[in-house]
Image (cartoon, rainbow, N blue to C red):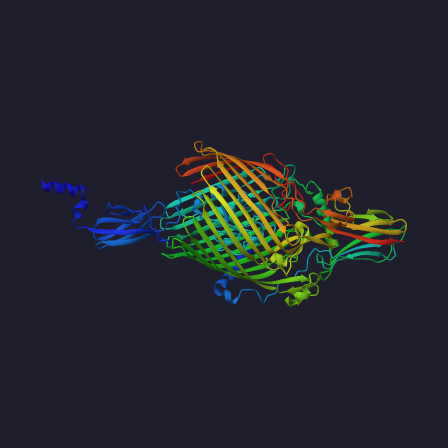
Amino acid sequence: MSINLFNKIMTAKRIAVCFMGGLLFSACSKDNEHPKPINQEEVITTVRVVLTPGAGSMPIELQSRDLDGDGPNAPVITVSDNLLVNTTYSGRIVLLNETMTPIEDITEEVAQEANDHQFFFSSTGPIGTIVYADEDGNGNPLGILFNLSTLTAGPGTLTVTLRHQPKKPNNGTLADAGGETDIAQTFNFTIQ
Amino acid sequence: MRGIHALLFAIAFPTYIFGQQCSSTLKGSVQDFHDQTPLAGATIQVYGTDKVAVSNLEGEFTIKGLCDGSYEIEVSHPECSSQFFTLDIQGDTFKKITLEHHMEQLNEVKVIGDIFLNKTNSAQEATLKIDALERYSSGSLGDALKQITGVSSLSTGSKIVKPVIQGLNGSRVLILNNGVRMQDMEWGDEHAPNVDINSTNSVSVIKGAAALEYGGDAIGGVIVLEQAHFPAKDSLYGKTILNGATNGRGGNGTTELTKSYANGWFIKGQGSFKRFGDSESPDYILSNTGISERGGSMTFGKHNFAQGWDAYYSFFKTDIGILRASHIGNIDDLIRGINSQQPLVVNDFTYAIDPPDQEVTHHLGKLTYYHRFEGVGKLNLQYDFQLNHRLEFDIRVGDDRNKASLDLELTTYTLSTGFKIDAKSNYKLNSGMLFRYQENFSDPGTGVRRLIPDYDKYDFGGFLIGEYIVSNALLLDAGLRYDFSRIDAKKFYQTSRWEERGYDQEFQNFVIDDLGNQLLTNPVFDYHNISATAGLQYDVSRETKFRFNYALSQRAPNPSELFSDGLHHSAARIELGDLRIKRETSHKLSLSLQKTGTAWGYEIAPYFNTINDFILLEPTGLEFTIRGAFPVWAYRQTNARLIGFDASAYSQWTENWRSDHRFSLVKGKDTDRNGALINMPSANLVNSIAFTKKDWNNLRVSLDSQYVFRQNEYPDNIIVRSPEQNENVVLEINTPPDAYHLMGLDAEMKFGLSPNKTLSIGLAIHNIWDTDYREYLNRLRYFSDDLGRDFLVRLKLNY
């Protein structure tokens, strides 16, 4: 704190001297220094829902990727394949910051602060149940891992919402949980 | 016998005896230093003799029967500081004496509001004096200013209060703190002036841009904070104020001490401290709305009437919590927030201030020198330095938990000169120049893309103002000002944003580095602004004045209007500046008719302000991110028109009873789109009745009622698609809250403890009926009710 202030005073002194001495030469502006670029931290660029039907089967990936973060481009949503009828998938969520090199895995941060986070799932179409398959330190659901079962054929949607600092435990609805939304993405797919 | 007479004479009238040899006469004239007008009633005393004379109406005096030699002479006048000098008398001598006859020196310790002269002649102007300010000692400048008709506020909760003058705020309102134009990032809606209200002795508001000497871009107006003058006498005085309040369960204290000397030296120190926990609305705790504030100032110097200098330094630091429930993740959270009648987060009362919060520090230093040239005027030189450091903390996770999301450091250096010619009785001229350099540094350590880029800004300004007294009743004034400013920024744009805005078509030459997904650009803009004013003041009768003023003013866009780009979590919105934004130009006509009688008085002040290329920020659409959708607030320019009037009246019904009434109304219109302007203050009516009785320890009890009408003119709401509800919904982001009525009580008594010590005890109740209300110009109105009932106790000791 005091070092901070000291630095400030030193900066101030430097520029004050410059100002008094040579305003007209603009010797004091930092023309030669470029500001440092910032790669936004704790940004989630990519949400990947990996649905694995069973051992040995190819997983299906539902992905939403927004490489410019709060920039103007909307997220690009891709679904790798159709889901199968009457199947139970074990689901896993992967959150990435792909603007960083190497790519940052945000899922770990969420897992570390499990008590402050919870994923919520809602669906339309012929989807049976979505059940949490993990929990936080207090035994409340977290949702990085879950199980999803399909029923009959038809179009369906899955909405994944991540809330920061929700009320825990809650009754499983977003309305009851409160908190702030870190992720809210909807995926459209076909069950066949 | 004759010898005895002679002896008696010699004993009784020694001077007469020696007067035989002492036949020199001192003749002279006493004049005002500034305009050389004769001063009547000045007392001229010759030390070592009993010779005393009083100047006549022509300012002349004669003292006969002086011996040749050297004398000490004192010249005093009730409205001037006394002068001592040594004079050699050789035969009949003539001496011209000039006194500074501008203002009455302070009596004892009391600070008299009237010593603060009007800043303009023809503009609408109002002043808050020390006793009115002291009642707001525990609040903010913005709170106190609301006592002035036509001044309202744009606030973020109850602690961040930005003054609004006749409908305009932010960069359109210039704040002059002890002669220094505040450079404290006034461009942000949630950036309150970094001023400790306790460090000032008087606050004047000039509505409009007529006060050209302070700046040409004050389209809204100028707020002038001033220190009391230091008496040129040996004196030591001070005061201490303590306040305690139930709402927020906190209080503040401030103390100041001044030492002054007859030879013009003075030194003053002041310090204050404020601490509040969470505020409370009538029904719930407003979690995370505490405040911790410290301020201090120190000044010393030597003021004589021919010349003087002073040095001043002030420090201000504040940490303000922002309502926890106002921090939201995306549009659905905002919809939930607006629809919910209660804040979504209500915790137990605490003094802790957690994110979201802001921590701002402001240092201000200045050196002033003045010299008066007899019969000509006064030269002023000033150098000032300001450092404003703003940290904004957001709710963050992981390692970034305690890291600020915004870290800006704004450093400003200003050199200004002024020359005032006030020697002639029928005209005055005031001219000046200003050089300013400003540097903004945005610390990349935050790990969040910069909201405001690094920039250098250069300003140069010059003005000439004149006033001409046509007759005893009529005074004309006029002024002209030129300002140059250059802003030289280095900003990173996301490539996608750069292209979406179409900058790749118009501004590709600004690009100096391409990092793939980001571009480093170097926008440089120059602005040449002209401002001018002309007006008149006419004394209809002794108590009634008529004023008319026209002001032209031009304002260059601020860094936020040009460059802001990014997600603002506290508002759950993406804010976009625009490099194409040009300066705005305002033409304002204002009139006022004022009567200040002893029994009653009034003021009616209508105005008409047309602003070309008015810059405004409003919701325009929606952008999608991984977090969901966000409303986009973009700056745009339009032609606007503000019409309104301020009216006030008072009546001294009896010796003890007085009532005051104020009403103000402003209508803002976007003339291009033929719609209402956003964020225009609602009409409001204030009535108060006060009982004062000197015999009862200066008892003063006042009851006031404030009725705030609903703002019925506002821009359309926006329709957004809610991902959560999976349908289009109307986002009531512009719908104003209902009208409300608040009542307050304030009582005060003064007790003389000793000849030099006075203790005042005050008690106040705000929002007596614990009314639930929300204010249109409170940015947190979406999330919670405003403050509930509050009891305050105030102790003030003057010594």
Q: Is residue B607 visible?
A: yes
- Residue B199, position in %: x, y? 49, 47
Q: Is residue B349 left or right of residue B463?
A: right
> Nearest the camera: B173 or B540?
B540
- Residue B450, position in %: x, y? 64, 58
Q: Quadrant of residue B250?
A: top right
Q: Is residue A116 visible?
A: no
- Residue B428, position in %: x, y? 42, 55
Number of numbered discs overlaid on the protein picture:
0
Split into 4 quadrants, where in the image is the N terminus of chain B?
Answer: top left
Where is B495 relative to B219, above or below? below
- Point 51% across, 53% down: residue: B210
- Residue B703, position in %: x, y? 54, 35
> Nearest the camera: B522 or B124?
B124
> Nearest the camera: B256 or B148?
B148
- Toward the left, the furthest residue is B1
Split into 4 quadrants, where in the image is the C terminus of chain B?
Answer: top left
Q: Is residue B329 left or right of residue B165?
A: right
